[in-house]
Image: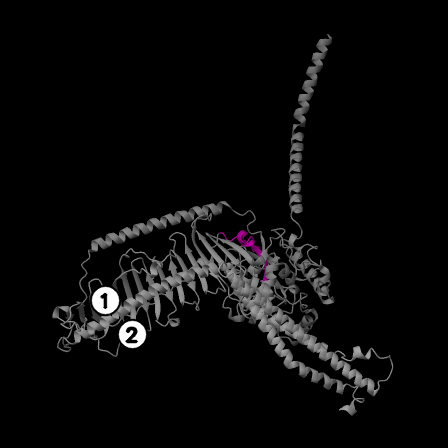
Amino acid sequence: MEVLKEKVEEEEEAERAERGEKMMRPMEVRKEETIMTQEMLRDLERKLSEIEVSIPEKPSTFTKDAIDISKLPLSYQSNTPKEEHLLQVADNFSRQYSHLCPDRVPLFLHPVNECEVPKFVSTTIRPTLMPYPELYNWDTCAQFVSDFLSAVPLPDPLKPPSYLYSSTTVLKYQKGNCFDFSTLLCSMLIGARYDAYCVYGYGSQDLCHMDLTREVCPLTVKPKEMVKEEEKAPPKKYAVKPPRDLTSRFEQEQEIKRQEAIKAKEERRLKQEEERLVEQESAKTDPLHGLRVHSWVLVLSGKREVPESFFIDPFTGRSYSTQDDHFLGIESLWNHKNYWVNMQDCWNCCKDLVFDLGDSVRWEYLLLGTDKPLLSLTEEEDDGTNDDDDVENLGKEDEDKSFDMPCSWVEQIEISPEAFETRCPNGKKVIQYKRAKLEKWAPYLNNNGLVCRLTTYEDLECTKTLEIKEWFQNREDMLELKHINKVTGLNIDYFKPGHPQALRVHSYTSMQPEMDRVMEFYETARVDGLIKREETPRTMTEYYQGRPDLLSYRHVNFGPRIKKLALNGAESNPRPVVKITEQFFRNPAKPADEDVAERVFLILDERIQLRYHCREDRITASKREFLWRTEGDSKGNKIIMTPDMCLSFEVEPMEHTKKLLYQPEAMMKLKNEEKLSRHQVWESELEVLEILKLREEEEAAHELTISIYDTKRNEKSKEYREAMERVMHEEHLWQVEAQLDYLAPFLAQLPPGEKLTRWQAVRLKDECLSDFKQRLIDKANLIQARFEKETQELQKQQQWYQENQVTLTPEDEDLYLSYCSQAMFRIRILEQRLNRHKELAPLKYLALEEKLYKDPRLVELLKIFV
């Protein structure tokens, strides 16, 4: 029975438990859901708390320990009564704005400065005109701010910073966030008379992070070339018809189709590559798009002849249109006079915004005293506002409510010449672009004068280098730009005027001689008028301009070099000249049939070909060809000319008839000119070798030029300044010595307070003069002793050299000669000092004697002896 009872009880308990479970299941489900929600909230709060803790309130670069507040002016550490009044006005404006626009974020009105003192943002702008002409325009000014400062991200990308330091502190540490950049740039632009404003708004991720990897480097963009249409000469009535075109039209059409197919294939490949890149970029969407806080500068049209308003990103220094997609919205903007809040909808970014700050509907201003006039009212609205009382009341009300902006609390912005020259922090800055990397250095930071380097790549990962461009400054060889093509191996050097060889451009693949190269020159700096020289292993082509002989072109063909022992290389074993072709400009002083247009020297064939200029009324030109023979007469004086030695084609044979006597004279003259041309070719080859040798020395030395006004780097100027300071110091010591009392040592021997007698005055004078005389003699003896010592040491060295001259090494001889040179220099100096001392000693003695006679303590007692 007990067992049955236990079973029944167990069954009853199970039934009750089952019924209770069914009844409590909804409640438990609700409890579980509540627990899960609470856990999610706790997890979210935990993550948010971690985010708040991980982001510091202030950047590590601007800590209290780093900034010495005690050295800052009083305006940084406290507010004036007018500034306190402005903060109250700003708080009242902020409360009204929050009440009327509860869905808008709080305004950026009065962040704290480096001294933890709240300052209104407009008073942080300090308009300043920099003393450097390069900073007078907005583009160079923005580029300077971009290069001079290092970007620091905002503590919270979704909120403006709680601090805004002065521009002087930002310049001192060369770091800041986007608001610091904008404040400094706006101060400089307003000082340069631009209508500039700091903007608080929202930007894209690339803009906020200064990510230019999707942007094309401006230095790689080639300017559009303006194609000038050539003016066609009017057709002549009796002009010769051009020959018929006998090329196949079918082949031309097939070639065009083939080129179009290749072009279409390449376009499809580029399009597919762009679509792939777009897909990759779109896959990396920004979760905070439209919420990232950013600050930039707005420049309105009007002042400084700005035709259209535009934005300036202070991080990069680049200008953007107000319609650009990088700028996603504007909350407010301000300058040094007022503060405006944007009341327009930014659903379409900034494309539909109207930047008429006088429109109080679109822009709500803080202070009534603004330089932006209100929009004119329409006639209907103006009908009821003509009452004089209303105007007077309105004017009184405006006068009561008007409040002008206090002066800026920031000190005068100053940039030292050293900091302006250094530009980048630590003198170097690297910017990564799309398939390009730009490196900048301060002048004189690199020993070779490198200031900028642009490296372009083939792929987006920047692993395959295509070309490198390097810009130089202050080079003694006047090198300005070096262009290196890594694919073809072609190097192009560009020079400024002033190179020793007047070199302008040098294109080469190797610095070895007799290789492919092109040299361009400044023709005005050369006597021979050479413009360009092209060289290959077998040819050399030169272009001239402005020569007296009207030579314009010379082309030389070389043959294979004859193998022989050469001690001096190519100079003693030049390449044999095979052919020389020269062309000349038209000489209007000569008839066209006598003015040579082209002259060809066929040296191996011993022939000379001449082609003359074509007359304006002819279509062909006269030609002559001379065949050189070594045959002479019985005496061997003259060459015997035969008709086959001079072949000619005359356009007008009846006008110019030349006798056979003319031919040998012309042939002898041409032969002499051939020798002269070969000599000039040889000089050109030597000049090429000289230029190559000079370029190797310049690349190895790469010395820099230093201005005479740069006293810190110019050693000669520094030595001259130190010498001048030394002379001034010696003159000062001499003046101090002259003011000393020369009678004091002798007056100290007398009893104090005793009046001088005549006999004592005479004795003092004689003792002072004798002592001075002895000192002059001692100085002369000292100089004489040093002179004799140097002379004896030199004689000893000369005697030693005579005894050991045969066994001396070249190093010992150099040391001996150096010692002799220095010893002779010292001996000459001592001799000059001794002679000068002998000349000045009597004059000094007489001057001292005169001073003693005029001394007020002895003048009355020594009158009888004068």
140 vs 782, left or right, is: left
Residue 213 x/y as whole percent: 49, 52
Q: Which residue is mark 2?
A: 549
Residue 7 x/y as whole percent: 69, 12
Depth check: give the residue in front, 572 or 666: 572
Circles 1 and 2: CB atoms closer than 8 Å: no
Identified by mark 1, the residue type is Val
Q: Which residue is mark 1?
A: 600
Q: Residue furthest top?
A: 1
Task: Say how many tags the image has.
Answer: 2
Identified by mark 2, the residue type is Asp
Identify which residue is drawn at 67% across, 46% down.
53
Give the vertical position of 3 relative to 739 (above or below).
Answer: above
Q: CA distance from mark 1 to mark 2?
A: 16 Å
Depth check: give the residue in front, 587 or 431: 587
Is residue 360 in view?
A: no
| SS category of the residue bearing label 2 | loop
Part of the protein shown in magenta: 198-213
Residue 760 x/y as whole percent: 82, 84
764 vs 525, left or right, is: right
Q: Residue furthest front?
A: 803
What numbered label is drawn on residue 648? Answer: none
Magenta region includes residue 581 = no
Residue 188 image-quadrant placement: bottom right
